[in-house]
Amino acid sequence: MKMKSYAQMSLVPVLLSSPLPLYAQTGGSLNAPAAPTEPGSAMFTLEDIYNRLNDGTTGAKRTGSFVEPGAGPADNLGKTLDDVMGIAPEKDDTDGAATTDVLKDKTFWGLKSGEWGLQTGTATIPSCTPNPNATTRFTDSGGTVTDAYTCLMWLKDAKCVGKQKWTDVDTSAKVVTLINNADPECTNYTDDTYTDWRLPSLSELIELLTSGAEYLVKPLTPFSDVQTSYYWSFTSYSGNAWYVYLDNGNVYNGGKDSTFYVWPVRGGQ
């Protein structure tokens, strides 16, 4: 009696008991997309998919015909499905951004349920027209204060970045770094979406402290920790820089290696 091999015997019940056609269980058609000699038979690799998720690498399929490898695989066989899943984004309904959180027409990858995948933002920046006759001049947003007279946004805490040399705050990047590293002095500043904080010009600083360019506003509400001391402006003068004494509004200029308070502002100019 001729016996069937183990492989032949084990294949029979699999085929007979399978509720679905075999091609359906493979995830698609068993037919090749094109002949091996055609570029259409090329596919992205797991390495390509991993790199796209990891750092945005575009990836590329081969453009010619398939070429048999000249040697067997090395010990490092590349990325696995587990590697790919390990860096794939996960749903986040708590901290994930919604379309209303992102500026209009800006694309992003949504993590929220119902807004998963590539999304386009819908938020708009509130417009502001300077109004020196506004009934309410200052709008307190928690960590920032917006001046209706000028549309400038100031940090609410006028002391949070402390005293600095002018040369350490002469660029926006330096000011932003100071704000981000000032914890816990800037703990009341909660909006990290702005990256254009800077030193105010001399005229901007004076205008903040005056009403109708006639007298100092005292007290400066709703700001906090406003110091009766000197504050830098960005405006230079003959190699020095202008600064203002907040007690009386007097203006001076001095060496840029002096240390005075910094009051970050954004907008304008």
Image (cartoon, rainbow, N blue to C red):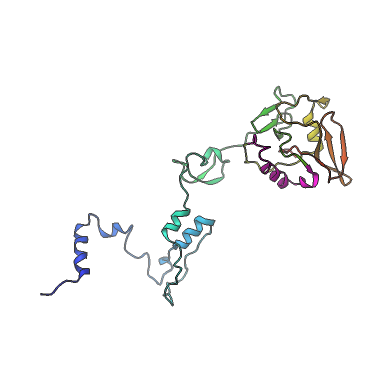
Q: Quadrant of the N terminus?
A: bottom left
Residue 128 seen:
no
Q: Is residue 42 above or below residue 195?
A: below
Q: Residue lying at the far bottom in this picture: please name it.
A: 70
Q: Image quarter for residue 121? A: top right
- Check if residue 172 falls in the magenta segment: yes
Q: How many marks?
A: 0
In the foreground, 43 or 248: 248
Please indicate whether residue 226 sits to the left or right of residue 183 in the image: right
Q: Is residue 146 above or below residue 258?
A: above
Q: Which residues are magenta?
A: 164-189
Residue 136 rendering spot, x and y as whole percentages: 70, 23
Please indicate whether residue 18 sits to the left or right of residue 99 in the image: left
Residue at the image point whose x is 46% and y is 54% from the top: 86
Residue 98 rendering spot, x and y as whole percentages: 51, 39
Residue 67 rendering spot, x and y as whole percentages: 43, 74
Q: Residue lying at the far left in this picture: please name it.
A: 1
Q: Residue lying at the far front in this picture: please name it.
A: 184
Q: Image quarter for residue 20? A: bottom left
Residue 56 rendering spot, x and y as whole percentages: 53, 56
- Check if residue 116 falls in the magenta segment: no
Residue 124 seen:
yes
Q: Quadrant of the C terminus?
A: top right
Please indicate whether residue 79 sits to the left or right of residue 1 in the image: right
Q: Residue lying at the far top in this picture: please name it.
A: 135
